[in-house]
């Protein structure tokens, strides 16, 4: 059933919340600059989370409290400082339906992974040929 929500280049994350009996599926919709929230039981879009520039590479923390979405949108690279941040990761709180904060990173983000303890997100930057590691505890204020 969920195959019809698979969008080329998009990544879906399933989360179960106390407010719903069935899990919700979060799907990046890059060109629309949002993350879609789909009720898995009804295959219906029930919400969208705007404010993420061309989101890509969505991942959930192990406890399901946060989602991290990368952005394929880059500002021009600073030639004097090629490691300067020019893209962002978005930390989303799905229970509150909004972006909690954005974290600057160097280069558009392609895929994200979360460490098993939920403390770090690893993001790939295909235009730069490397990865970044972001401490989520520090960025969340934990």
Image: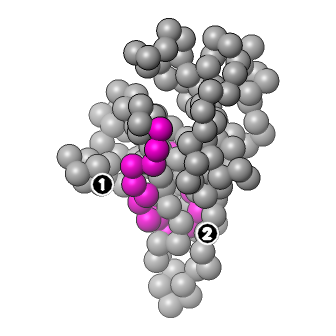
- Specify whether 35 is left or right of 20: right
Q: Label 1 belongs to which residue?
A: 139
Give the label on residue 123, or none: none
Q: Is residue 47 magenta?
A: no
Task: Write down the region rendered in magenta.
Answer: 97-112
Q: Position of residue 115 (x, y in %)?
A: 37, 38
Q: Label 2 belongs to which residue?
A: 74
Q: With respect to residue 73, does 122 lie above or below?
A: above
Q: Position of residue 44 (x, y in %)?
A: 69, 21
Residue occupying the point 74% across, 14% down: 1
Name the outermost residue toward the left.
142
Q: With respect to residue 87, does 37 lie above or below?
A: above
Contact check, label 1 and label 2, Cβ < 8 Å = no
Residue 57 in sight here: no
- Sequence-wise, which precedes: disc 1 or disc 2? 2
- Asked which secondary structure carries label 2, the reply is loop
Q: With respect to residue 83, does 127 lie above or below?
A: above
Q: Position of residue 69 (x, y in %)?
A: 53, 47
User: Dot 1 surroundings within 10 Å: few (below 14), some, or many (20 or more)?
Assistant: some
Residue occupying the point 64% across, 11% down: 41
Residue occupying the point 69% across, 44% down: 29
């Amino acid at each position: 059933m969920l195959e019809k929500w698979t969008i080329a280049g998009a990544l879906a994350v399933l989360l179960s919340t106390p407010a719903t009996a069935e899990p919700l599926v979060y799907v990046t919709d890059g060109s629309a600059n949002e993350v879609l929230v789909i009720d898995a039981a009804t295959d219906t879009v029930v919400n969208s989370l705007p404010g993420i520039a061309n989101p890509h590479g969505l991942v959930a923390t192990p406890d399901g409290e946060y989602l991290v979405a990368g952005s394929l949108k880059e500002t021009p690279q600073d030639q004097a400082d090629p490691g300067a941040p020019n893209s962002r990761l978005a930390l989303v709180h799905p229970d509150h339906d909004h972006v909690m904060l954005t974290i600057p990173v160097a280069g558009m983000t392609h895929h994200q992974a979360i460490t098993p303890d939920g403390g770090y997100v690893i993001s790939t930057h295909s235009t730069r040929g490397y990865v970044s590691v972001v401490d989520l505890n520090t960025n969340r204020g934990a």
